[in-house]
Image: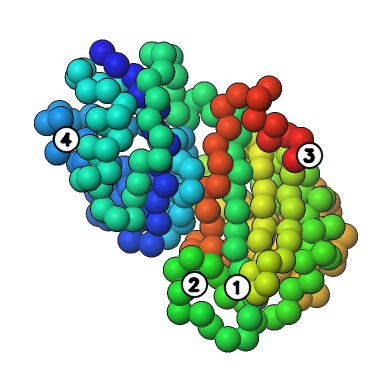
Amino acid sequence: MKYFKLTIAYDGTAYHGWQRQNNAITVQEVFEKAIFDLIGKNVVVQGCSRTDAGVHAREYVLSFELDSTINCRGLQFGLNSRLPEDIAVKKCEEVNSDFHARYCCKGKEYEYIVHNSEIKDPFLKNTAYRSWYPIDAEKLDAAAKDFVGMHDFKAMCSTDCTKENTVRTIYYFNVRRDGDLVIFNVSGDGFLYNMVRIMVGTLLFINEGKIGENDIPKILESKDRTKAGKTVPPQGLYLNKVFYNEGNDGFERK
């Protein structure tokens, strides 16, 4: 028996998130089918996290065990020849049997992209959220620092969230402008359902004057979802990095 850790990337536009579902096509379903097509065996793949419909991943980690003689090179190239063009295996490693893509994960980094322009760009339709209202990136970068640290993020998660423990630690949250794009970059030890999209929506409400620029600590303390900003659409969100080795990755020190 061999144990594999694969790093993949995907454009989530055509998929209803990562996790297999009965009534919609998902990345997990497509990936498991590609493995079956390659080696003729049904394999259950463990993903590092769920992603919502339309959300993308530049770095998504998955793991599985395989009773096969195939090596990493054969697995990577074999899967890439069978996967659709919007999913790619970037890296393949053999790991110990105790590695689990989800349970061994120490943290994640997400990126959210806003196309801040009055003029739409057809090439960004599925890969960024367009907001015409002028964004002060420096102002939002300062406000985003109020999310950093260990807090109860109940006010920043969907009302559909079923987690009893809503305390998470944010390591960094940076906002910068690159031309017409405003990029929100956030890392933490874990994220609740819709948490990143609500944090970004809250910052956009601050930008529009709907929430005070110093109000984030007060909103977090309230634990009241209605006091935070909107949930921004999924197409601007990317799972950017997944961290497994705290001492080497440096994700707490950015």
Separation of residues labelled 4 and 1 (CA atoms) = 39 Å
Judge whether 236 appears above or below 122 on screen.
above
Query: Three-letter amino acid code at disc 3?
Result: Gly
Q: Position of residue 174 (x, y in %)?
A: 74, 53
SS category of the residue bearing label 1: strand
Separation of residues labelled 4 and 3 (CA atoms) = 45 Å
Among all residues in the image, which is located at the extreme bottom? 119
Q: Position of residue 62 (x, y in %)?
A: 40, 33
SS category of the residue bearing label 3: strand
Q: Which residue is mark 1?
A: 115
Q: Which residue is mark 3?
A: 149
Mark 4 and mark 3 residues within 8 Å of each other at the beta carbon: no
Q: Which residue is mark 4?
A: 38
Mark 2 vs mark 3: in front = 2
Separation of residues labelled 1 and 3 (CA atoms) = 28 Å
Label ID, residue 124: 2
Query: Three-letter amino acid code at disc 4?
Result: Leu
